[in-house]
Amino acid sequence: MKKFFERSIKLVKWNCKSLYAFTLFYKNIIYSTNVIFFYIFNILLFNNGYNNKGIGKFFIRYYFLINMSNDIEILSDFTENVLNSEKDIRWVGITDQNGIIINEKHREGLKLLLNNEENQESAVNTITRHKSRTTFEPKIGKLTYAFGRYENFSRFIIPINENYYLILTIEFKEKHFDKIIIEKILPLIKEMKEKLVG
């Protein structure tokens, strides 16, 4: 009986050590995976020498799926609703507070003027410029929307909340863009904000 207990104790100790070793191994695998993921993520976003729109898009989508899963479906539906709210809307994108595009849709059959990398760079620049102009918000109030008039389209940025921004482009020929924003887009934003967690 004594030998049985001694063997049992040794077996338990061995299993505990094995479990501990496995736990450390598992934690190291998870940590290494995260390090590798963010390394690739940063390269694909910020190193022009390694641009790959397919893989880059996958990693961006994966990052936001695991970090903002509660909002993804809401933002996707919202993007679709904005695009369908007016026939002259060309492209709709949702970005995070750093300008990273996390959801986008464009009108069916539309030939986009910017590729994925250019679109992403443009979005980051747009959000960066917007943030540089918020110094006087306490005095003049928060931005409702801002737009730029280009030869090929009009582009708009609309803050949704502290976490998200809406960027959209409308056909240049459309002159009643203010009415579209005020009467169609802003009500959709108000409705969608009530569903967001963040």
Image (tube, rainbow, N blue to C red):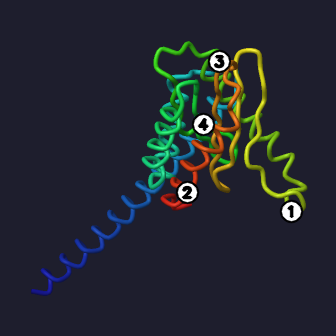
Q: Circle 1 — which element? A: helix
Q: Residues within 10 Å of mark 2 (few under 14, many from 20)?
A: some
Q: Residue 104, how many percent across, how many down?
A: 53, 33
Q: In the rendered image of this protein, does residue 173 appear above or below residue 179?
A: above
Residue in front for this viewpoint, 156 or 130: 156
In the image, which is nearer the foreground, mark 3 or mark 1? 1
Determine which of the numbered discs, if any, sits on residue 127 in the image: none
Q: Amino acid at mark 3?
A: Leu
Pointer 3: what residue? 114
Pointer 2: what residue? 193
Residue in front for this viewpoint, 180 or 111: 180
Say whether disc 2 or disc 3 marks the residue closer to the N-terminus.
Answer: 3
Q: Residues within 10 Å of mark 1 (few under 14, many from 20)?
A: few
Q: CA distance from mark 4 to mark 3?
A: 14 Å
Q: Circle 3 — which element? A: loop
Q: Residue 33, how many percent across, how many down?
A: 49, 44
Q: CA distance from mark 4 to mark 1?
A: 28 Å
Residue found 59% across the figure and 16% down from its top: 112
In the image, which is nearer the foreground, mark 2 or mark 4? 2
Say whether disc 4 or disc 3 marks the residue closer to the N-terminus.
Answer: 4
Q: Quadrant of the N terminus?
A: bottom left
> Relative to 28, is 19 on the left or the right?
left
Q: Are marks 4 and 3 in contact (CB under 8 Å)?
A: no
Q: Amino acid at mark 2?
A: Lys
Pointer 1: what residue? 138
Q: Circle 2 — which element? A: helix
Pointer 4: what residue? 101
Q: Residues within 10 Å of mark 3 (few under 14, many from 20)?
A: few
Say whether disc 2 or disc 4 marks the residue closer to the N-terminus.
Answer: 4
Say whether disc 3 or disc 1 marks the residue closer to the N-terminus.
Answer: 3
Say whether disc 4 or disc 1 marks the residue closer to the N-terminus.
Answer: 4
